[in-house]
Image (cartoon, rainbow, N blue to C red):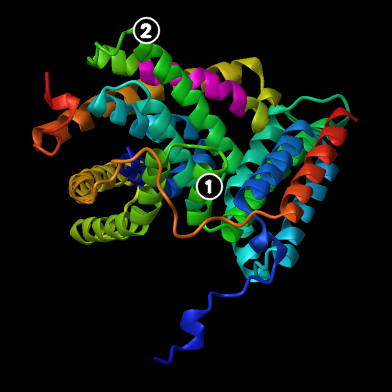
Amino acid sequence: MAMLATANAIVTLYLSSVNQFLNSLGGPIATSTIVGVYMVYGLLAYYIIRKPGTGVITYGIGAVVQSFMGTSYGIASCFAAAACYMVIAELIFFLLRYKRWNLAVLMITGGAMVPLWFYFAAHMFGYTKWNLSVLIIALVVRILSGIVTCGLLTKLIGDALARTGLLRSYAISRR
Amino acid sequence: MNRNKSEAAPKKQRYILEQMDPLSKLIILFCVAALAMQWDNPAMEAGLLLISILLGHYAGGIAWGSLTSRLTYMFWFAIPLFVLTLMASKGDTILVQWGFFTLTKEAILSAGGITLRLLVLFTSSIVYMLTTKPQEFVYMLTTKLKVPYRIAFAISLALTFLPLLEAEGRSAAAAKRIRMGRAPRGGIERISLALNLAASVFIAAIRRVQHTARAMDAKGFGAYPERTYLRTARYSNIGFGIACTVMALTAYLWFN
């Protein structure tokens, strides 16, 4: 969990140049297309380990690591985002009794993690000043990003890592 | 045996923010963030930003050059946000009208407030990050917030491996650029490079997990419910007093 959170912090650092490029291209709506990538590490940890509390620990560690690496949106937003993601992820897998780990579940979870943080981010970063139609478009783009770049990517990365044999001792390999 | 004095004695912390414990500073940071998010007025946000910058330099010992360079980096995020909020916000007091584009006083104030808020959140976080040792933060989690030491150790592990994985990430990124023969062009190439890099970093992280887990098992990590610490974070009444004062001030400003 710690290593995945660290890996995410590194990836986030390199994504900042992509984020900047997208921001100058189309502002927050354009940057919403890669929102899902920032959530991958926690869902990936859950997909690999498959135990209750994995999301809380991984997203919590990720928030701390990102805080000390430096973040453009502030330490408070790191912790707020992590709290939103972990609540939704834990709730969904709790409801599924930690038994279903197929692509559909991962994509739904990836999409479901977005709205709660979007609500807080909208108030923190002033998205509420936008037109309702612009807000809805941004939310839809983020949810699609969560479904595709978080959910789908988690499945692809997790299965690719499992095929390498590196995850022999984890639940993902015991199917 | 004679020891070099500079090796034996730790660097003296001259600034108050360096001497304060991580928990008190975290409370102050969250108070600043709460006020920044509560206020919309650009003048008040500018005031908070100025306070953050001055505290960073005079109370935290952060050089002007360091603060300036980081704020300059942030402007590349802040300017598009300002422009887009300006275009998206509505208002009644029209200043300029040019075709479909209408510039109102309220839109300028909203955009200014939001942009300055982002800068306040960023600056206050930078001040915290540069005046807090990560290990002291981890000690604070276990000793004050009673986070189980296994989880706190995982955080410590993550922070320890951060520079190693970062160096590996840089090497992998450089290798990919060399193989490409040129710098990436456009968004798609950048995103593709970033995804490739992400895969390399994740695989390196997973490999380290196994090595580290074996080493920790060999040393009996987790055998006991409690553990002792060689060093602990310093807690003082001054830090606690400052944190309580800031909380009280925040509550007053929030409701008035």
- State the image coordinates of residue B2 (x, y, percent, origin top left): 43, 92
Q: Are marks 2 and 1 on the same chain?
A: yes
Q: Residue at the location (71% across, 45% down)?
A: B28
Q: Dividing the picture into quarters, in which one does residue B62 lie?
A: bottom right
Q: Which residues are magenta?
A: A109-121
In three-dimensional space, the C-alpha distance between marks 2 and 1, rounded to whole angstroms, equals: 33 Å
* Picture disc at residue A95: 2
State which quarter of the image contains the N terminus of chain A: top left
**Disc 1 secondary structure class:** loop
Q: Is B228 or A1 nearer to us in this picture?
A: B228
Does residue B218 lie above or below A27 as drawn? Answer: below
Labels 2 and 1: the sequence-earlier one: 1
How packed is label 1: few (under 14 Cα within 10 Å), some, or many (20 or more)? many
In which chain is the residue bearing label 2?
A
Does residue A121 lie above or below A23 as drawn? Answer: above
In which chain is the residue bearing label 1?
A
Amino acid carrying mark 1 in the image = Thr
Amino acid carrying mark 2 in the image = Leu
Q: Is B228 or B9 nearer to us in this picture?
A: B228
Verify whether residue B96 appears in magenta: no
Q: Residue at the location (24% across, 16% down)?
A: A103
- State the image coordinates of residue A128 (x, y, percent, origin top left): 68, 23
* Picture disc at residue A71: 1
Verify whether residue A117 appears in magenta: yes
The main secondary structure of the magenta stretch is helix
Residue A53 visible to the viewer: yes
- State the image coordinates of residue B71 (x, y, percent, origin top left): 63, 57
- State the image coordinates of residue B112 (x, y, percent, origin top left): 76, 41
Q: From the image, state whether disc 2 or disc 1 is nearer to you.
A: 2
Residue that extends furthest to the bottom in the rendered view of this protein: B2
Q: Is B216 or B78 nearer to us in this picture?
A: B216
Q: Residue at the location (43% across, 37% down)?
A: B148
